[in-house]
Amino acid sequence: MKKHLFFICFFSVCFIGFSQKKVTKKFSSSTKEISISTEGLDDFFLENSDSKFIEIYLYAENPNEQHIIVSEKNKETQIKFKIPVFKNENEVFRKYITKRLKRATATIKIPKNIDISIYGENINISSRSYNGNISVFIENGIVKLDTIQQNLELKMYAGNIFGSFKKTNLKVISKFGKIKINDNFYQKEYQNKDISTAKKVSITTIKGNIFLTTK
């Protein structure tokens, strides 16, 4: 890792409430692509940064040590989370509970115009009008996109997707779910072409419900 390209510095680690722990990491990077693995998280929030720094805030009720892992590979910044599970938590047990034991949430603030890729399985994602290209690849969850500012590619198996857009070349597909654009419902697929812009939004899901509005 080249020091002149990539710099990390810790700012704070503190406890909040009874057992919830907050871990913060703030750093700068010259890469224009960021890959984020949401494994271990229940909720993930993507926000615009007001500075040149990338800021990560991790909250978890598990009192054990949590880790934010940041690395650089092939001109891409990679962010992962290592969150220990409770001793009595195992994969078989987790399949039969609806409330996850980890109860971990992460918020990441990123400067605009950086390409973001988000990966995960069961995860709720909120993009608070992030001003950059976004790719999302998850199995299940709730995705709240707020206002889609630039290009978006979203693929998921099941869940609910909410967002708004303007001046967009839009293509959405849901094989078995609902598609609602403004007040109208569509079967399986909806497309809208806008020759005044190059922005593209593509959403593909098998059982997911898609709810979008124009601005």
Image: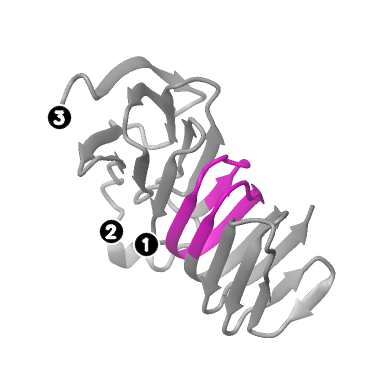
Residue 1 shows which numbered tag?
A: 3
Indicate yes or no whether the magenta region holds residue 134: yes
Q: Is residue 122 visible?
A: no
The amino acid type, in three-letter code, at marker 3 is: Met
What secondary structure is the stretch in magenta mostly built from? strand
Q: Nearer the viewer, mark 2 or mark 3?
A: 3
Q: Earlier in the sequence, mark 3 or mark 1?
A: 3
Against 56, residue 132 (above or below) is below
- Circle 1 sits in a helix, a strand or a loop, which is it? helix
- Circle 2 sits in a helix, a strand or a loop, which is it? loop
Give the residue furthest to the left: 1
Q: Give the residue drawn at x 49%, y 22%.
A: 16
Residue 90 shows which numbered tag?
A: 2
The image shows residue 115 at horizontal and vertical percentages of 43, 45
Are the residues at dot 1 and dot 2 in contact (C-beta closer than 8 Å)? Answer: yes
The span shown in magenta is: 125-154
Q: Give the residue drawn at x 48%, y 68%.
A: 156
